[in-house]
Image: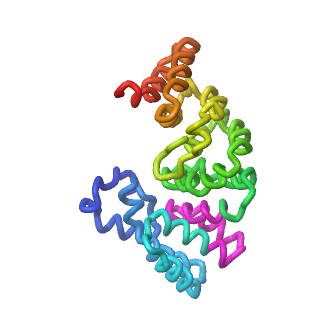
Amino acid sequence: MQNRKGARSFNNLDQEVIDYLNQGKIETANLIEWLAVDQLKLVKLILKDLDKSHWYDSFYEAISAQKKPTANTNTKIIGLTFMQLSTDQSIFEYLSNHISDVPRCWATYWAAMQETEIINRLRVIEQYAGDSHFGVREVAIFATKDLIIDNLDKALNFLLTWVSSKDDNIRRYAIEVIRPIGVWTKKIDDLKENPEKGLPLLTALQSDSSKYVRDSVGNWLNDASKTRPEWVQQICNDWEKQSATKETKYIIKKALRSLNKA
């Protein structure tokens, strides 16, 4: 069960897998499974393990108060509710190191939201940005994007130290979290208008060995091409002259895909 690929649609979900997911016994294998987790059912079991069943009503009420609940908003609300109910480090550590990725997602919000200063928030989020699970890594982006937008220059300067990390996930986070348009997250208007602010980070990864990182760099430039096409074309021309590696060529092709369709 641990090595499954995951269902391709909600109709193909296996009930046994769902049961294991809702009991926190396994990680989700893909986005379909992550969306299918009954987080209230899971939090109820975890509260029982923590001998905190009396907290359940607080989670139920917070989740139910939403007008348009989603898996991501549920994740955020549960993380914030844990933060509001407790300062117990042992509970935080329990969630942060849980076998299931979903409690680790809750812990990601808990860790991030207790830090209102951008550098402190980025420092505590590093653990989750480098998590082995895709879901935790994406929540690390959701949990920091707004504060990064509000403190962009300071965040860019700090993230410049992360593009030299040995961890592919950390290098990818440093680019993905500042994508001008991105997916499911707020746009960064400053970078749409002034993409050159992100160039030092991109340049450091123009020939990265990791496809995961290269995809993010290419997607970043493709985002920027929607508002600054000439700038992106010039950067790609420069990189093509500076670096003849197959890795750089891969990024350039991805970066120019929208412009080449025009």
Provide residue 136's location: percent of width, then percent of height: 53, 55
Is 190 situated above or below 6?
Answer: above
- Looking at the picture, tell me which residue is in the foreground, 234 or 139: 234
Q: Which segment did they paint magenta?
A: 82-111
In the picture, residue 15 is in which quadrant? bottom left
Provide residue 139's location: percent of width, then percent of height: 54, 56
Residue at the image point whose x is 58% and y is 54% from the top: 140
Residue at the image point whose x is 49% and y is 69% from the top: 74
Residue 149 magenta-highlighted: no
Magenta span: helix, strand or loop, mainly? Answer: helix
Residue 177 in sight from this viewpoint: yes
Q: From the viewer's perspective, is 164 left or right of 64?
A: right
- Looking at the picture, tell me which residue is in the foreground, 145 or 22: 145
Q: Residue furthest bottom?
A: 54
- Looking at the picture, tell me which residue is in the foreground, 230 or 202: 230
Is 27 situated above or below 222?
Answer: below
Q: From the viewer's perspective, is 121 left or right of 254?
A: right
Q: From the viewer's perspective, is 78 left or right of 260?
A: right
Image quarter where the N terminus lies is bottom left
Residue 86 magenta-highlighted: yes
Provide residue 81's location: percent of width, then percent of height: 60, 75
- Looking at the picture, tell me which residue is in the foreground, 93 or 259: 259
